[in-house]
Amino acid sequence: MDAVANVTLTQALLIALFAGIAGIDLFNVLTHIHRPIITGPIVGLILGEPQLGLVAGATFELMWMGLVPLAGAQPPNVVLGGIIGTAFAIVTGQTAEQAILVAVPFAIFVQICITFLFTVFSPLMSTADRYAKNLNFQGIANLNYLGMAILFVFYSVIAFSVIYLGADAAKTLVQLIPAWITDGLKFAGGLMPAIGFGILLNIMLRKQYVAYFVLGFLLTAYFKQPLLAVALVGLVFALIEYFMREHIGESPAVVKVAHDEEEGI
């Protein structure tokens, strides 16, 4: 992968603006524009490499798809992990697998900072309770706007600082790293999507779905079918199972009425 020219101030500001919006989306809106599969192509488009951005974003998405927050346990921050990782891959000319091992430490650091921000912000909950007791809806709205503003500034500043101020340093560092280390990073990074997918399977896989998993593996590994074909086969089975369950869920009376209508009775 060839490295791009230096990141311009305009490009860094645009990425910072998008990072702020994506950070708000993660906690307040949930349109899922914060996912790497979305942030990757957008960062790539801003840097003039949308295809490389899509490849990097898809790779990061595979890793993060199984990392979900459970109670107090929070995964590495998906927003800046995807944005900084994609920008690093494009700016330095590294592969997405190599960029993963740069993105993850940043993502962990950002999540620690986010947890600290939420801890500092928690005393305001009593203020929100007081506003609610007094029916002060505007006060509650202002607290929410304050939280979103803080998140926007935080994500934007981190993204701008790392991408604009750290781009040249990242290039220099990559050039100094021996080839055997970068090859090792590429190999280790290539395992990360598999780990993320494995975690997702551990959460979702049930014994009644094993047959579908095996079928998909056979179609891909032995029959060399493209992913779109395998996805369409999966869609067919999903529709069959959906309508079968819908039919089984109908009461006998409803089924009898439907049968009588078909017979013209």
Image: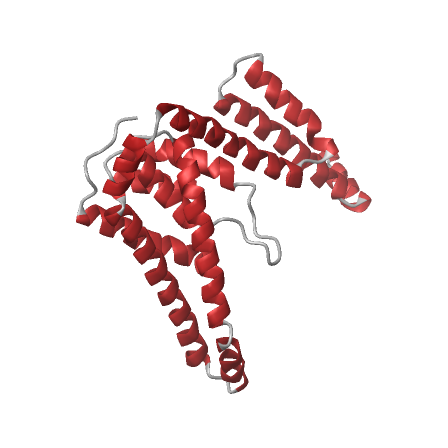
Quadrant of residue 186 in the image?
top left
Decide if residue 121 is in sight here: yes
Question: In the image, is 196 to the left or to the right of 14?
Answer: right
Residue at 63% of width from left, 28% of height from top? 237
* Residue that appears at 64% across and 26% down: 213
Tell me: residue 191, above or below residue 14.
above
Q: Residue furthest right?
A: 252
Q: Is residue 224 above or below residue 69?
A: above
Judging depth in this view, the residue of 131 and 182 nearest the camera is: 182
**Residue drawn where x is 38% and y is 53% of the image:** 22
The residue shown at (37%, 40%) is 85
Where in the figure is residue 95, as x and y percent of width and height? 37, 29
Residue 32 visible in rendering: no
Q: Eyeballing the image, is 121 above or below 136? A: above
Q: Position of residue 108 (x, y in %)?
A: 47, 50
The quadrant in which the C terminus is found is top right
Left or right of 238, for residue 99: left
Q: Position of residue 38 (x, y in %)?
A: 39, 42
Extreme residue in the top direction: 223
**Horizontal side of residue 9 vs 32, given as left or right:** left
Foreground of the two, 165 or 96: 165
Is residue 253 positioned above or below 20 on the image? Answer: above
Pick whichever, 140 or 106, lies toward us. Answer: 106
Tell whether 16 sits left or right of 75: left
Q: The N terminus lies in which quarter of the figure?
A: top left
Q: Position of residue 210 (x, y in %)?
A: 70, 28
